[in-house]
Amino acid sequence: MQRNEVKKILIIGHVWPEPSTTAAGHRMMQLIEAFQVLRHEIVFACTASSTVHSLDLEDMGVRTMEIKLNNSSFDEFLLELKPDLVVFDRFMTEEQFGWRVAEFSPRALRVLNTEDLHALRKSREESFKQHKIWTVEDWKNHPMTIRELTSIFRCDLSLMISSYEMELLKEQAKIPEQLLLHLPFMLEPPSSEKKRSCPSFIERSGFICVGNGKHAPNVEAFKILKQNIWPKIREELPTAKLSICGAYLPQQVLEMHNPKEGFEVKGWVEDLDKVVRNARLLLAPIQFGAGIKGKLIDAMSNGTPSITTPIGAEGMHASLQWPGAICGHWEEFAQSAIHLYTQKDDWRAAQERGVVILQKQYQKSTQINTLKSRFVNLQNNLQFHRSQNLMGRILQQQTVSASKYMAKWIEEKNRK
């Protein structure tokens, strides 16, 4: 078989994908669909337990496998499967299984799906909790940064979802560009029929804020809305309603529910697109985090303008104008929300800007062709590619010396 023909891909998941509850799950579903468009055979393996929200991968034609940490049964699995390409879902998965893939499937292309830079998100969260202004030095000095960069160097390619994070790695960490690929969300542009059926300004009502309750930035966004933003909006729009939607909402968020104030905590909704499509405006006062915010992509896809922060919009729209407003202060945030909610012409202009961003930044066919081209090039030049990555080879050797024998010790201990 030629190296550039149909390939067998093994995805080692951090968790089973939940596209209805997390942006990460939606991203994984897009990757799987892209691999299927390219006619790859896909096997998804994971150590975690599934949940009621987990996607049924078997229905998509994806073979699934439960695997164990620190267990040589995975080595046998690799030898039998003989994958041409292995995708590690987040750097923690590469830490756990990367050395085994390198040893038992040495010819397989090793790809890291970063989702976002976890150390960037964590360093920003810690700065937020300490009431200090985050700087890039906080990221550089965070203990998770070294782990994450080490995984990136060890892999043949890392998929970067955010253009900001792509530049951060190249400029601040000096990661060679040939080890990185900017691959944002892969979306079909809104069809003419979808545009026609999209509810108009008059047909929509209410505000919406979306977020998985397991993610701290979302919980803090709900708090800011409740305490700082929503009271200002209600002063001007006393009959307006705000819906808080998302899975796994903690008790402190559930207790914010107050219909008299128009603050309605809905929790998980089965058809989020429908809810977003019927809202007039999406609010996302995100104070820390990383990567691309799925809620803001969902808003654009459903023709719903959004108000967010600089971190919320980071790495998402290049030099294109935002479909709504980007605000750094809560008073400005509230006033921008009131303005767009009440001004039909400005609302329509913002809606159209979202369509432009989707077409120019997230075109599915363009992203899939980019992915295919890079995979083919790497597969056909893998030996040379790896020979140029001296740091990756050094770190791979160090990993084998440390992680391999620690894993074997744990395995022996578990047998007793």
Image: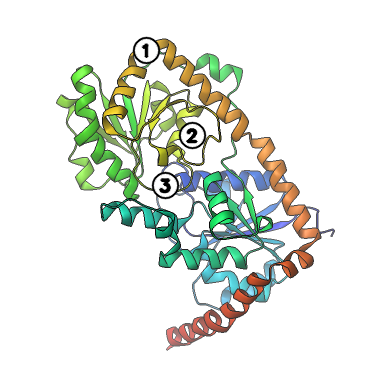
Which percent across, then down, holds residue 98? 59, 70
Q: Secondary structure at mark 3?
A: loop
Residue tagged 3: 53
Q: Is residue 219 visible?
A: yes
Identified at 56% across, 44% down, the residue is 163
Say if mark 2 contacts mark 1, CB within 8 Å.
no
* Image quadrant occupied by the N terminus: bottom right
Disc 2 to disc 1, how far (Cα)? 22 Å
Between residue 337 and residue 4, name the one nearer to us. Answer: 337
Disc 3 to disc 2, how far (Cα)? 20 Å
Count of labels shown?
Answer: 3
Q: Position of 137 compared to 155: left or right?
A: left
Residue tagged 1: 343
* Image quadrant occupied by the C terminus: bottom left
The circle drawn on residue 297 is 2
Q: Secondary structure at mark 2?
A: helix
In this rendering, the answer to whether 407 lies above or below 122 is below
In this rendering, the answer to whether 36 lies above or below 108 is above
Which percent across, then down, holds residue 242? 27, 27
Q: Secondary structure at mark 1?
A: loop
Give the residue type at disc 3.
His
Residue 8 sits in quarter? bottom right
Residue 120 sits in quarter? bottom left
Which percent across, then down, holds residue 159? 60, 52
Give the residue type at disc 2.
Ile
Give the residue type at disc 1.
Gln
Q: Is residue 50 visible?
A: no
Disc 1 to disc 3, how far (Cα)? 38 Å
Identified at 46% across, 63% down, the residue is 145
For marks 2 and 1, the one nearer the N-term is 2
Q: Which class describes the residues within 10 Å of circle 2: few (<14), some (14-19), or many (20+)?
A: many
Which percent across, then down, holds residue 39? 73, 47
